[in-house]
Image (tube, rainbow, N blue to C red):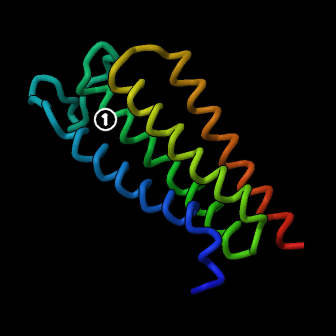
Amino acid sequence: MESFAAYSHALTALAFWAILISVLGALSTMGRTPEGRCDCGKPKRNYDDVVYRRERAFMNAIEASGPFLASTLAAVLLGAPVFWVNLFAALFVVVRVAMAVVHIGTTNQPMRSLFFMLGLVCILALAVLAIFAAF
């Protein structure tokens, strides 16, 4: 396990990601009412409604989970440069926490888009690091 010690920040970022997903999942269920639900059980589309925004923040985080986990684990397991893997993994989580706060607390679409793009850049950087480490 000592070979993974250098990646402690990236691995800790994965643990924080699990906590964030769990918290967002719990928040996404709060305040739902029968009147505010579609037939599928999800909140009706309405960005002015915080219940809908909490659901969307959770689902958006779930959608980012696969690429983040895959790129981070690939980079760690392939021995990509430690500094960059740790940086991009930790930065991804920080950016996504900020995105969740903005997503839930406001209707500011440009700010959500900015945080989404910053998170995407982190994922792509991790994937590129993993690919180059494989060669």
In this view, 31 is above or below 50: below
Residue 42: x and y in percent read 25, 35
Please report the residue visible at 64 percent of the width from the left and 58 percent of the height from the top: 86
Single out the residue that lies furthest toward the right. Answer: 135
Question: Where is residue 41, by image quadrant?
Answer: top left
Image position, residue 26 (x, y; %): 22, 46
User: Where does the C terminus fall, quadrant-wise?
Assistant: bottom right
In the image, 128 versus 60, the foreground residue is 128
- In the displayed structure, would residue 87 be above or below residue 101? below
Q: Where 42 falls versus 11 (above or below)?
A: above
Q: Dividing the picture into quarters, in which one does residue 28 lie?
A: top left
- Residue sitting at x 26%, y 22%: 50
Q: Which amino acid lies under the numbered mark 1 shown in the image of this protein? A: Glu
| Residue 56 in the figure: left or right of residue 72 | left
In terms of image quadrants, where is residue 115?
Answer: top right
Dot 1: within a 10 Å radius of its alpha carbon, few (fewer than 14), some, or many (20 or more) residues?
many
Residue closest to the far left: 34
Q: Name the residue under label 1.
A: 55
User: Horizontal placement of 31 versus 19: left or right?
Assistant: left
Image quadrant occupied by the N terminus: bottom right
